[in-house]
Image (cartoon, rainbow, N blue to C red):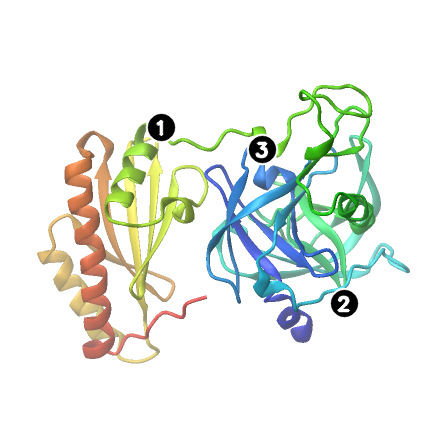
């Protein structure tokens, strides 16, 4: 299993939009990143990140609401990688499978389970039912057999269903890929009426050339425009010269890398609270007491900021209620958080023996 996990690290991609986060995987034979349509829905472009690629913007080039499949244009760095697709030859209930993805925004998690139903039908489409744990953020990731071949796309779960997950069998993906490449990588959309794939060069006045049904192509999707608190936060990040498009991590959520620290910004509309957490360094295995003492002392002295520890991570947090948030004060507070994160990272590592956080 370890060899399989290592093999997939470079081709499993993290995807983020203003509306959601998810997973994708690269297929070299077709030179596309595959994911679920619901992961990229209402977006012409998405942020992608991976083991061997830098975080960047990539174009959505195919959407398919019928089978919940989407393709993203792949960066050149992925082109030498190869992972095979398997049409489930010899697969049956009880076979072990591996689900790979980025649930809850975490980097690269792997879970193991078994196929429990080969022919679960939902809205006219057959799915593989399995019990490998998948969660929000796993959508679009690969389901893999123990030979290291992709047999499905992890697509949805039963809420509170105790690890009941469903994956679209890879035969649907192969058929879609073969139909898509006939358009020579033009952006395309599957028509909901006749189910033909329609390419941009074929559309006339917004209607499917095969059946005449109204169809919306990818280029007609409106670019995202933030409003309300999201607009305020993104204007502040822009003033501080961060790329807000690359920073988006789903609804009212942003992630900034600044120096050695990673800062997560999340807005909770229920209580009107902006939670800004800077993940600094990590606790060592020894000498923890002096770090705790130092952090408690700093908490007593800091005004508006506080330290906490989650698992092994040392976190510096800033809380701002939206009624006190405006461009001027927000920029000042964000800048102070970034500066303090850099400062305390160095102090904790160099003087108190904390460990630099591993960057994925």
On screen, residue 37 above or below 32: above
* Residue at the spot of label 1: 227
Earlier-in-chain disc, 2 versus 1: 2
Left or right: 121 as drawn, with respect to 351: right
Q: What residue is at 73 percent from the left and 47 percent from the top?
A: 184
Element under disc 2: loop
Left or right: 116 as drawn, with respect to 354: right
Image quadrant in which you'd find residue 74:
bottom right
Distance Cα–Cα, label 3 vs label 2: 40 Å
Q: What residue is at 53 percent from the left and 42 percent from the top?
A: 45
Q: Nearer the viewer, mark 1 or mark 3?
A: 3
Q: Position of residue 111 (x, y in %)?
A: 63, 60
> What is the crowding at mark 3: few (fewer than 14 residues within 10 Å), some, or many (at least 20)?
some
On screen, residue 271 above or below 284: above
Furthest-left residue in this view:
301
* Residue at the spot of label 3: 219
Q: Position of residue 169 (x, y in %)?
A: 79, 48
Earlier-in-chain disc, 1 versus 3: 3
On screen, residue 357 above or below 25: below
Distance Cα–Cα, label 2 vs label 1: 46 Å
Q: What residue is at 53 percent from the left and 67 percent from the top?
A: 52
Q: Nearer the viewer, residue 38 or 90?
A: 38
Q: Are marks 2 and 1 in contact (CB under 8 Å)?
A: no
Element under disc 3: helix
User: Quadrant where the N terminus lies?
Assistant: bottom right
* Residue at the spot of label 2: 146
Element under disc 1: loop
Image quadrant in which you'd find residue 97:
bottom right
């Amino acid at each position: 299993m370890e060899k399989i996990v290592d093999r997939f690290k470079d081709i499993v991609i993290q995807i983020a939009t203003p509306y959601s986060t998810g997973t994708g995987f690269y297929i070299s034979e077709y030179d596309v990143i595959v994911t679920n349509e619901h992961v990229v829905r209402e977006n012409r472009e998405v942020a992608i990140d991976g083991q061997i690629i830098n975080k960047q913007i990539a174009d959505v080039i195919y959407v398919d609401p019928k089978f919940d499949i989407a393709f993203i244009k792949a960066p050149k760095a992925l082109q030498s990688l190869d992972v095979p697709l398997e049409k489930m030859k010899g697969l049956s209930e009880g076979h072990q499978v591996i689900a790979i993805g980025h649930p809850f925004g975490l980097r690269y998690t792997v879970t193991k389970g078994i196929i429990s139903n080969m022919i679960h039908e939902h809205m006219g489409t057959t799915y593989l039912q399995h019990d490998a744990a998948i969660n929000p953020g796993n959508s679009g990731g690969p389901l893999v057999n123990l030979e290291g071949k992709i047999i499905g796309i992890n697509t949805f779960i039963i809420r509170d269903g105790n690890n009941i997950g469903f994956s679209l069998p890879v035969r649907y993906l192969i058929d879609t890929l073969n139909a898509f490449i006939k358009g020579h990588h033009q952006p395309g959309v599957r028509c909901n009426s006749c189910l033909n794939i329609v390419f941009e060069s074929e559309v006339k006045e917004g209607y499917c050339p095969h059946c005449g049904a109204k169809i919306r192509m990818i280029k007609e999707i409106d670019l995202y425009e933030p409003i309300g608190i999201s607009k305020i936060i993104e204007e502040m990040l822009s003033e501080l010269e961060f790329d807000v498009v690359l920073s988006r991590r789903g609804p009212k959520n942003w992630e900034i890398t600044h120096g050695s620290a990673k800062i997560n910004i999340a807005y909770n509309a229920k209580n009107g609270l902006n939670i800004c957490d800077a993940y600094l360094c990590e606790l060592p295995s020894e000498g923890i007491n002096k770090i705790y003492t130092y952090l408690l002392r700093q908490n007593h002295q800091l005004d508006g900021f506080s330290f906490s520890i989650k698992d092994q991570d040392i976190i510096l947090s800033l809380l701002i209620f939206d009624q006190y948030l405006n461009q001027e004060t927000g920029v000042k507070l964000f800048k102070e958080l970034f500066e303090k994160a850099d400062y305390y990272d160095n102090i904790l590592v160099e003087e108190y023996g904390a460990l630099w956080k591993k960057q994925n």
